[in-house]
Image (spheres, grey):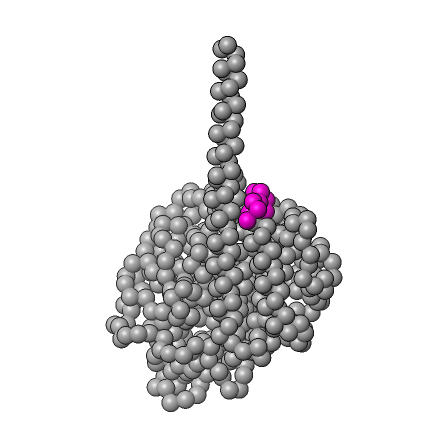
Amino acid sequence: MAQANATATRSQEGATKAADIKAGGDVRDAAIRSKYRAVRSATSELAARVSAEDQMVQSCPEASPMKWHQAHTTWFFETFVLLPFLKDYRPFRKEFHWLFNSYYNSLGEEIPDKSLRSTISRPSLEEILAYRAHVDQEIDRFVAAGVDDEVTRRMVLGLNHEQQHQELALTDIKHAFFSNPLRPSYLSGPLSDEMQPPPSDPTWHSFDGGLVEIGYPLRAEDPLDFCFDNETPRHNVFLEGFQIANREVTCGEYLEFISDFGYLRPEFWLSDGWNTVQRESWLAPLYWQRKGEDETGWRVFTLTGWRGLSELLDTPVCHISSFEADAFARWKGCRLPTEAEWEHVASQTKVQGNLLESGRFHPAAARGTGIEQLFGDCWEWTASAYSGYPGYKPLPGLLSEYNGKFMSSQMVLRGGSCVTPATHIRATYRNFFAPATRWQFSGIRLAT
């Protein structure tokens, strides 16, 4: 009798556990479906503000057409979720498998020259939108039936991948409109709603250093917990004591560097930076132009069109390279923070700031003396080269090409920008670009 009761108890416990697992899975599936719809809708809303002709433009090698962004993010879900896991899935069009591949060499054929993306007039925008609708419908059908942990992880990766492309799409359309002689604007209206006092001189915050932990503390058992592979593993770093500025460098402060002939004085520049300045004839940040009647003699192109620099003097300088950030820091007798220093500071504050959801789409001025602008406004160049953390392992399989193969000749940026989705950024997030890159919303925070 006792044995029978024990068996019944174990059976009941097993049934309860199974019910709990199913209930947890249902909640998780509902959460991922909701997140999927929100992210995909956000991409569509950003793209809907420009014409079909605008979505064909690719104005520099780093950029991609808006139409391509919409197709490639859809391709990601089709390639890494639907095709390997949904047995009855039928591809929208088989040519898309290679046409919208970005850099996954393991998948086989792709467009070899990224700059050729703007020459692909077909498929039409209408067909791309139909492709998005097809994949959205199939994803919804798939997830509604219940998916396992691996599919959930790939879904979450795909959503973060799409948020990256939302930021890139705005960065790219800004460059495209700047390259157009008509200088069209993406948005209309003022950059600020009210007059505010200018920011105070930067204040310096001291940190003792010592042994600190950086990197994302990933909970592997939770498929909804996410970071990119390059944010792991969490590990110890020893920091010397340091000071960091409370805010980003402003346009007005950077104008002083220009006025002091900073672009003509090789003593402030790294060798490759000086060679780049000479070759590219740089005399100011990207989108600054010596024209118009502005009292500073400069105007700046934004996603709302031209603005006099006098209107932006208190806002963070952006669209500068790592070389320019480093040269400015040397001119000021300072340096750029390392990424470990930056993360140590940022991990002690909340993720909040002038991000994509603010709708401003341009850096905003700091107003206090506390540490501000760590998240949003501008990606901040660090002094750290992009490489794997100790013990780093890329994602398994085809997704191993996502981050790891780019760990060469790049510098790390931290903090997100005014076009980064708020749910996409965190203190451990590592962005990376070649040091001469300027088309991103990139800026400066000083350290000593």
What is the magenta range?
144-153
Q: Residue at x 59, y 71 (%)?
A: 67
From the viewer's side, name the closer residue of 352 and 239: 352
Residue closest to the far top: 1
Say which quadrant the C terminus sits in.
bottom left
**Splitting the image into 4 quarters, where does residue 258 fall?**
bottom left
The answer to whether residue 58 of the structure is visible from this angle is: no
Residue closest to the far bottom: 293
Q: Check if residue 229 falls in the magenta segment.
A: no
Q: Check if residue 146 falls in the magenta segment.
A: yes
* Position of residue 66 measured from the top left corner of the image (x, y, whole percent): 56, 71
* Position of residue 166 measured from the top left corner of the image (x, y, whole percent): 51, 65
From the viewer's side, name the closer residue of 44 and 331: 44
Residue closest to the far left: 197
10 vs 364: above or below: above
39 vs 24: above or below: below
**Splitting the image into 4 quarters, where does residue 58 fall?**
bottom right
Q: Residue at x 47, y 44 (%)?
A: 27
Q: Exactly how many numbered labels are in the figure?
A: 0
From the viewer's side, name the closer residue of 432 and 158: 158
The answer to whether residue 1 of the structure is visible from this angle is: yes
**Secondary structure that dominates the magenta span:** helix
423 vs 300: above or below: above
* Position of residue 207 measured from the top left corner of the image (x, y, whole percent): 35, 50
415 vs 8: above or below: below
Q: Residue at x 33, y 74 (%)?
A: 192
Q: Residue at x 70, y 61 (%)?
A: 97
* Position of residue 146 measured from the top left corner of the image (x, y, whole percent): 56, 45
From the viewer's side, name the closer residue of 46 and 317: 46
